[in-house]
Image: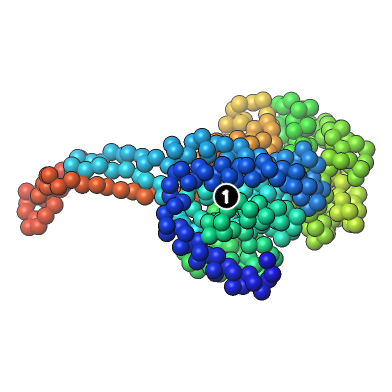
């Protein structure tokens, strides 16, 4: 879609979607189920194109690229449970409302905007779309221009499957995002970095539009001395290096109990070599950095600390080796912002309270990882820290539980999705009270006699 066409096309698309939403077709449960089934089949039919796009954009191996197609499990969950999710929920009404009934009814919001990221450019576009469809909305999608091959797959899939007055895609660079954010939507769902998240929220504030911001942050990985060392190392290495570290919930830094630091690091080194061989540049299972600007940003982190594994890179291939950095200070550049790459800084602690204080001194992360056999220490971490989510004795796997809401807190995000949480995000839960005519007690009407005041006091105080 040419840039000059988009300038006029975006307001027109929003208007057409508003008009279609007013027909009330999207409110029918049968319509929503039909559209979810169409989306599922469209993804199944394009699996190879999705895998090829992920390879072209990020160098993703087919195994990791299948994470993008995991949206199908979200669709299956919605197909199975939508009728229950959308059912009005009866609530009790107090005796002073008698005769009456009360309930909460989930309503679609209207026309929503979904802005996707480049690191999982298909999955993180489709997953919120499942919630938007299930809740009965129209949607306008903006894929990341930094993953152009996947953006094209998304645009073609949506155009071939849905009418643009219902669901449409606007491709383009940051200027297209600016045009979209100038429009009034009923909800904006954004996945990306904190800096752009602030821009999205500021634009939404102009229209008082509610937002869901799925951001990130420096997710700590705390490792206690009472741990299965080998399995902890294996799970940390995997979680850090899938998609070449470009995962919003990847362990951002390692905070390990000082007594086991050397042993843990040795095992992490072992598994990195086991996963990717002596030269990860030649491994078919190791990805690449998305673009040169992000690559240069990551390389700058290598200037401080002691590189004890990796550190080599190739700008022409956007290759950066799995890298472990020791002797890192808390105020080094690599500890000042989310890394979002295959670099793992290593820091130590002596007592658990020291580790907790270090984590709590920083902005709240999207994920927190804690490895320990000790249930009391696990409970202490859960009680004393705040994060979007927690995974104990593993990394990243919490995102695969679609019955768990996924989202951040504080600077790591606003709102959540996955499973029913996605339906909730794109719904307004309307409160309804229905009174009957056959009885009308007079206690609330003027003139307000002493007796009526006594009755009111009795109602209020119970």
Which residue: 18% across, 42% down?
99
Q: Nearer the viewer, residue 248 or 303?
A: 248
> Is residue 364 among what the camera can see?
no
Whole-percent x, y for residue 85 in the image: 45, 39
Whole-percent x, y for residue 3 in the image: 68, 71
Q: Is residue 61 left or right of residue 34?
A: right
Q: Nearer the viewer, residue 75 or 390?
A: 75
Q: Is residue 273 left or right of residue 245?
A: right
Quadrant assignment, res 280: top right
Q: Is residue 233 left or right of residue 371?
A: right
Q: Quadrant of the N terminus?
A: bottom right
Which residue: 58% across, 45% down?
38
Q: Quadrant of the C terminus?
A: top left
Q: Nearer the viewer, residue 99 or 222?
A: 99
Q: Where is mark 1, residue-wise? A: 129
> Is residue 32 among what the camera can see?
yes
């Amino acid at each position: 879609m040419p840039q000059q066409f988009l300038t006029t096309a975006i307001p027109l698309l929003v208007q057409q979607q508003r008009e279609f939403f007013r027909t009330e077709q999207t409110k029918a449960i049968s319509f929503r189920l039909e559209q979810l089934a169409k989306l599922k089949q469209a993804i199944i039919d394009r699996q190879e194109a999705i895998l090829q796009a992920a390879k072209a954009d990020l160098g993703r191996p087919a195994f990791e690229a299948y994470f993008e197609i995991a949206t199908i499990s979200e669709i299956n969950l919605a197909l199975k449970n939508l009728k229950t999710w959308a059912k009005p929920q009866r609530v009790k009404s107090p005796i002073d409302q008698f005769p009456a009934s009360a309930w909460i009814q989930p309503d679609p919001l209207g026309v929503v905007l979904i802005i996707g990221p480049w690191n999982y450019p298909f999955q993180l576009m489709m997953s919120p779309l499942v919630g938007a469809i299930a809740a009965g909305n129209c949607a306008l999608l903006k894929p990341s221009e930094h993953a152009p091959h996947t953006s094209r797959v998304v645009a073609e899939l949506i155009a071939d499957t849905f009418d643009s007055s219902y669901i449409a895609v606007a491709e383009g660079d940051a200027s297209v995002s600016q045009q979209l954010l100038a429009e009034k939507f009923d909800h904006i769902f954004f996945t990306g970095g904190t800096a752009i998240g602030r821009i999205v929220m500021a634009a939404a504030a102009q229209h008082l539009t509610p937002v869901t911001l799925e951001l990130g942050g420096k997710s700590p990985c705390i490792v206690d001395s009472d741990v299965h060392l080998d399995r902890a190392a294996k799970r940390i290495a995997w979680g850090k290096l899938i998609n070449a570290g470009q995962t919003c919930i990847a362990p951002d830094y390692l905070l390990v109990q000082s007594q086991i630091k050397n042993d843990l690091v040795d095992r992490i080194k072992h598994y990195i070599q086991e996963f990717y061989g002596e030269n990860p540049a030649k491994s078919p299972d190791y990805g690449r950095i998305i673009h040169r600007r992000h690559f240069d940003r990551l390389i700058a982190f290598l200037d401080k600390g002691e590189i004890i594994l990796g550190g080599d890179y190739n700008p022409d291939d956007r290759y950066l080796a799995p890298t472990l950095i020791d002797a890192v200070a808390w105020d080094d550049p690599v500890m000042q912002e989310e890394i979002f790459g295959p670099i793992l800084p290593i820091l130590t602690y002596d007592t658990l309270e020291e580790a907790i204080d270090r984590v709590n001194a920083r902005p709240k992360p999207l994920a927190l990882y804690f490895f320990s056999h000790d249930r009391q220490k696990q409970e202490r971490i859960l009680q004393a820290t705040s994060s979007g989510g927690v995974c104990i004795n593993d990394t990243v796997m919490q995102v695969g539980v679609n019955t768990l809401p996924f989202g951040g807190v504080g600077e790591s995000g606003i709102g959540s999705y996955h499973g029913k949480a996605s339906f909730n995000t794109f719904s307004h839960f309307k409160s309804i009270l229905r009174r009957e005519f056959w009885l009308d007690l007079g206690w609330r009407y003027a003139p307000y006699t002493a007796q009526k005041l006594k009755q009111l006091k009795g109602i209020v105080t119970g």
